[in-house]
Image (cartoon, rainbow, N blue to C red):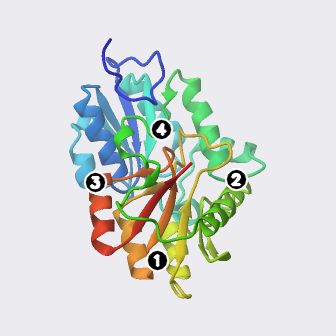
Amino acid sequence: MPTPLSNFLPANFDRTRPIALIAGQGIYPQLIANAVRRAGVPLRLVAFEEETAPDFIASFAPDEQRKILVGQIGKMLRALKDFGAANAIMAGQISPRKLFNGLHPDLKAIRILASLKRRNAETIFGAIAEEISGIGVTLLDARSFLDDQLTTSGSMTGRSFPIEQDYIDHGIQIARECARLDIGQGCVVRKGTVLAVEAYEGTDAMLTRAGTLKTDQTLFVKTVKTRQDFRFDVPCFGLRTLETMRAAGITAAALETGRVIMLEKPAVLAAAKQHGISLLGFE
């Protein structure tokens, strides 16, 4: 029996038909693209103007890419049809400010937004996922092809974790409750006190705020929503977050095992060890 390409792909995955990568910012889309290409699966790109890295777009042949503005859902759906894609995968962030000041909604997007009573990542991307499914394209788990980039249980930095278990448990409880309430997917705690919680401004801003307070024995916790839809909004931890932690004086992080994507994992672990930052995977 052939080795599966990824544990997160559906059983009926057809490796002969193109995957359309709907790509935002950062290294995440590039890691997906590299893995898909190594697997020999045809790959196409839907890129966002002023969001997706130009050099990454240039790595695709002109007939294998489409560029759209944030909010042009109808144009995105047409691109998926033109590509003959059987599957699509979302990877990479869109600048939060674009969702307020730089959105270019087409008629399809306007209809979707008008139908939503509550507008957040889950409802908006869930509605987009339904539109994608409606044209016969499967939106894949965003961890697909990145099995080796996921967090693992226990200390990942080869040293005893410096935070007491009671304080770890407290941080996990707070993070999970914030996620349940759809506030965010992370928090910073210190010895049973909540210093900061992640909201719309994102992880880096939260870490920076927490760094203005007393940071010895401080713990950053990252988790997922209670009913996380892994097709979108999957939490990530990479070199940029690690550098933000270092600048803020936060030297310990607990990340949910198998659910947080550790972008460029070998480089992240090496940098964490170099800077004395402890990383723990929790169940």
The tag on residue 163 is none
Residue at label 1? 250
Image height check: is 2 above or below 212?
above
N-terminal of the pair, mark 3 or mark 1, is 1
Residue at label 4? 75
Question: Which residue is located at x 31 percent, y 45 percent?
Answer: 31
Whole-Å distance between the Cαs marked 2 and 1? 32 Å
Whole-Å distance between the Cαs marked 3 and 4? 37 Å
Question: Which residue is located at x 47 percent, y 38 percent?
Answer: 75
Question: Dots 3 and 1: beta carbons under 8 Å?
Answer: no
Residue at label 3? 266
Image height check: is 24 above or below 213?
above
Question: Dots 3 and 2: beta carbons under 8 Å?
Answer: no
**Mark 4 neighbour density, 10 Å: few (under 14) some (14–19) many (20 or more):** some
N-terminal of the pair, mark 2 or mark 1, is 2
Dot 3 amino acid type: Pro
Residue at label 2? 119
**Mark 1 neighbour density, 10 Å: few (under 14) some (14–19) many (20 or more):** many
Front residue of 275 and 234: 275
Dot 4 amino acid type: Lys
Indicate the secondary structure of the residue bearing disc 1: loop
Say left or right for 65 vs 177. Answer: left
Residue 86 location, quadrant? top left
